[in-house]
Amino acid sequence: MSDWLTTQLGEHLAVAEATATLSDEIREVGTLVRDRLANGGTVFTFGNGGSAADAQHLTGELIGRYKRDRRPLPAVTLSTDASAMTCIANDYQYADVFSRQVEALARPGDVVVAFTTSGRSSNVVAALAAAQAKGATTLLFAGGDGGPARIHADRALLVPSKSTQRIQEMHTLMLHVISEMVDAWAAGEEPTP
């Protein structure tokens, strides 16, 4: 068991080190999210499976708080509305579950954030395309080259890995850094290093 754990930790550290090359992009995305919120925008998040959990995590940090007591910030996770998801999947198709919601809710000034490890999920790709058509800013958290979703992302944070586990671990790290930046701004403080 300890050999298996050592291998997992080694892989995690290697991908974390490689992800450090994205530090400028992560900071820029944090600034983008902060600025959109400061100007009255809403953050919409979504993903499938573990990526849906990452989407909910970011929304929770924005509406709740990261470290500081401050006002709640407008954020919505599209995958949490079971009625809308099943209605759209039933009446249209599963590939439309996020894009229909984006078409209904997103507007210029909003940030539409997709979490996906591969960037190949048709419902994620369609939602990013719908968000761009609505004039919202699109942000992609993915791995590798970002797959087809990359085409519809104004900004992309691409973890340099093909391992689902390692990509999701780095997504959590990145969303925490962004949450710290936004949280500090909303509380009128400087982010903690």
Image (cartoon, rainbow, N blue to C red):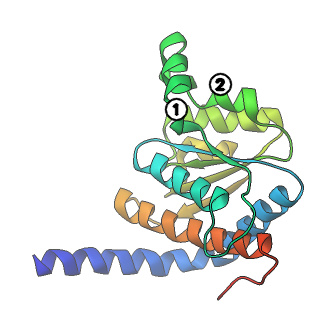
Residue farthest along the bottom direction in this orientation: 193
Whether residue 80 appears in this view of the structure is yes
Task: Say above or below: 107 vs 157.
Answer: above
- Left or right: residue 57 versus residue 11 is right
- Is residue 52 left or right of 3 when viewed as pictured? right
Residue in the picture at 82% in, 37% down: 107
Find residue 59 and report its horizontal and vertical position in percent.
61, 53
Asked if 115 appears above or below 165 in the picture, the reply is above
Side of 21 where 104 appears, left or right? right
Callout 1: SS: helix
Do residues under tags 2 and 1 come within 8 Å of each other at their CB atoms?
no
Which quadrant is home to the N terminus? bottom left
Q: Which residue is mark 2?
A: 100
The mark found on residue 191 in the picture is none
State the residue position of label 1.
Answer: 122
- At x 26%, y 74%, the residue is 8
Q: Residue at x 66, y 29 (%)?
A: 101
Earlier sequence position, callout 2 versus callout 1: 2
Indicate whether 100 appears above or below 30: above
Of residue 128 and residue 90, the one placed in the foreground of this image is 90
**Which amino acid, by three-letter code, is at mark 1?**
Ser
Question: Which quarter of the picture shows residue 175?
Answer: bottom right
Find the residue positioned furthest to the left. Answer: 1
Looking at the rendered structure, the secondary structure element under dot 2 is helix
* Residue 75: x %, y % from top left: 68, 49
Q: Amino acid at mark 2?
A: Arg
Q: Residue furthest top?
A: 91
Q: Nearer the viewer, residue 160 or 39?
A: 39
Give how far apart the Cα atoms at labels 2 and 1 are.
13 Å
